[in-house]
Image: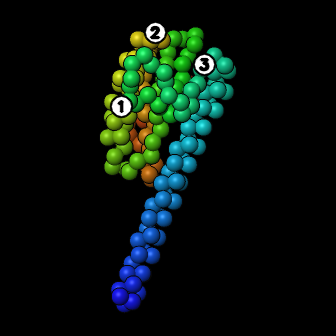
Amino acid sequence: MLIEKQVLSPLFLFYNHKILQCYKATATVRMVVMIVIIIIIIIIIISQGGKITILWNQQVQTDRTIPNNKPDITIRGNEKGTCMLIDVAISGDRNVIKKEAEKILRYKDLTIEIQRMWNVKTKVIPVITGATGTVSMLFRKYVSNIPGKH
């Protein structure tokens, strides 16, 4: 029994080290996503100057139960009658386009419900970047819809 513990101990330590590395990487990615969200909000606030309502990391209250009702940023243009649901993510380089489509489909029900309740034109803006900076061909189009100078 003593021999088994000595053999398994280095394997166990190696396994725990890998789990710790994965946890640190996940925490880093979350931190980068939060920084990107904060930068987007600052750009919008500076450019719009109080003419909009910004919800950050909050659920959108709807009449019906919608499972995906918490985008990263919700911007409601009070004067223009528009609403934008912005969702930020960092994915693997091969999954950028797939992740964009996933985000748009995820918030489709919420988009329809917001249009019905608030009587505004609503669109989903996915801000997806690969781990090494890869972006899709539609990235500029999506980012250009976000108000502000960028």
Residue at the image point whose x is 37% and y is 81% from the top: 8
Gap in Å between the C-alphas at discs 3 and 2? 15 Å
User: Where is residue 40 drawn, in percent x and y?
Assistant: 57, 34
User: Where is residue 137 drawn, in percent x and y?
Assistant: 37, 37
Q: Where does label 2 land, which residue? A: 119
Q: Where does label 1 land, which residue? A: 106
Q: Along the horizontal axis of the image, is 43 left or right of 13?
A: right
Kind of residue sitting beneath label 2? Asn
Label 3's element?
strand
Other-residue count near label 3 (Cα within 10 Å), few / some / many at <14 / 14–19 / ≥20: some
Gap in Å between the C-alphas at discs 3 and 1? 24 Å
Other-residue count near label 2 (Cα within 10 Å), few / some / many at <14 / 14–19 / ≥20: few
Kind of residue sitting beneath label 1? Arg
Q: Which badge, 3 or 2, comes first in the chain's sequence?
A: 3
Give the colour scheme shown. rainbow
Q: Quadrant of the C terminus?
A: top right
User: Where is residue 2 drawn, in percent x and y?
Assistant: 39, 89
Label 2's element?
loop
Q: Along the horizontal axis of the image, is 64 left or right of 20?
A: left
Residue at the image point whose x is 39% and y is 23% from the top: 65
Is the residue 88 above or below the residue 67 in the image? below
Q: Nearer the viewer, residue 135 or 51?
A: 51
Q: Which badge, 2 or 1, comes first in the chain's sequence?
A: 1
Other-residue count near label 1 (Cα within 10 Å), few / some / many at <14 / 14–19 / ≥20: some
Label 1's element?
helix
Residue at the image point whose x is 58% and y is 25% from the top: 54
Q: Which badge, 3 or 1, comes first in the chain's sequence?
A: 3
Q: Where does label 3 land, which residue? A: 52
